[in-house]
Amino acid sequence: MYSEYNTPKKKYNLKTNKYICNKFGLAEFFATHYDEFGYGKQLCILDAGCGALPLGIYLADQYDCKILGVELNPIAFKCAIENIDQLNLIHTVEIKNCNFVDFCNQYQGELFDCIVANPPINENVSNEEIEKYTNNTYETFDDGSYSFLTNSWHSLDGKDLADYIFEFGLKYLKSSGHILLVFCTIDCSSPDFVYKKAENYGYSVSRIIEDYIPAKNIGAESLGLDKVYTFMVEFGR
Ligand SMILES: C[S@@+](CC[C@H](N)C(=O)[O-])C[C@H]1O[C@@H](n2cnc3c(N)ncnc32)[C@H](O)[C@@H]1O
């Protein structure tokens, strides 16, 4: 299947699948507001949990950025490869199909100007669910494993992808670098949940853009919502 991805200057049709993040409302929020952060072109950017790669594609295609994407879901990884080929971005985008935790332990490359992500944020995931899915290889999929990976992923020690991003940034972000996260408050009661995490790793919030987006843009209309409150937040040190 293909999903529409609408950015202010360009519309994309990205290869997707029912077992990957295939509604790009949060990535569209990112693309709509990215210019307000005043970053230049040709930055070196890490897209953590890149999925079909909407954030990385936007930055590589429209800002000539060098992108490294990391994605655990093998189906999303294959879609991202197809999207890179389709858009002829092979020379500026590299992606790895692995757990971000393993990536962090092995990475020895250059420092990044920016880390971008719309990570799974779920304040109330149970230990039972973490234990059920965390050791999954994700070679076979069902609705539960897809939902865990996309919306709730945590490691067995209780850290989520945002924790690992903040931790990785301490070592591999340039001193002037930033972390840009996009998230909505469906699975966390308030953005303070994310801000407190950042604070624990020594980051502070340098800019917040917040607004409602239509729930259907992220496939959340089945929750009985019309709109969801969404945040794009810049963290620095
Ligand atoms: C909310 S989705 C966003 C995907 C993509 N950035 C987008 O905008 O469509 C979160 C992504 O993080 C990936 N992910 C979750 N935990 C991960 C981990 N430990 N390592 C790598 N990727 C992970 C999921 O598989 C999923 O593709």
Image (cartoon, grey):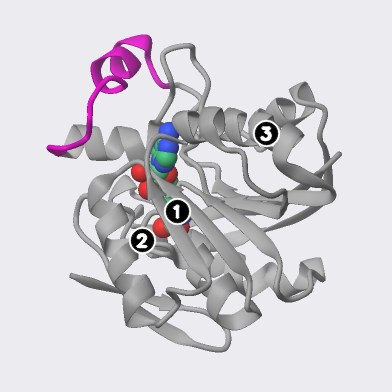
Q: What residue type is labelled 1?
A: Cys
Question: Badge 2: how crowded within 10 Å, few (<14), some, or many (20+)?
Answer: many
Q: Circle 1 is placed at which residue position?
A: 50
- Ligand 1 shows up in the quarter that is top left
Query: Is 97 drawn above or below residue 199 in the view shown?
Result: below
Q: Is residue 90 left or right of residue 184?
A: left
Q: Which residue is drawn at 19% across and 55% down?
A: 18
Pointers 1 and 2 in contact (C-beta within 8 Å): yes
Q: Is the magenta stretch mostly helix, strand or loop?
A: loop
Q: Does the residue labelled 2 lie within 8 Å of ligand 1?
A: yes
Magenta residues? 125-142
* Residue 140 is covered by the magenta coloring: yes
Q: Residue at x 78, y 74 (%)?
A: 40
Question: Badge 1: how crowded within 10 Å, few (<14), some, or many (20+)?
Answer: many
What percent of the width, then of the height, locates residue 69?
Answer: 48, 54
Q: Residue at x 23, y 25 (%)?
A: 136
Q: Specify whether residue 141 is in view.
A: yes
Q: Circle 3 is placed at which residue position?
A: 166
**Disc sitting over residue 14 in the figure:** none
Q: In this view, does 193 lie to the left or right of 152?
A: right
Q: Is mark 1 within 8 Å of ligand 1?
A: yes
Q: What residue type is labelled 2?
A: Ala
Q: What element carries label 2?
A: loop
What percent of the width, then of the height, locates residue 77?
Answer: 31, 54
Q: Circle 2 is placed at which residue position?
A: 52
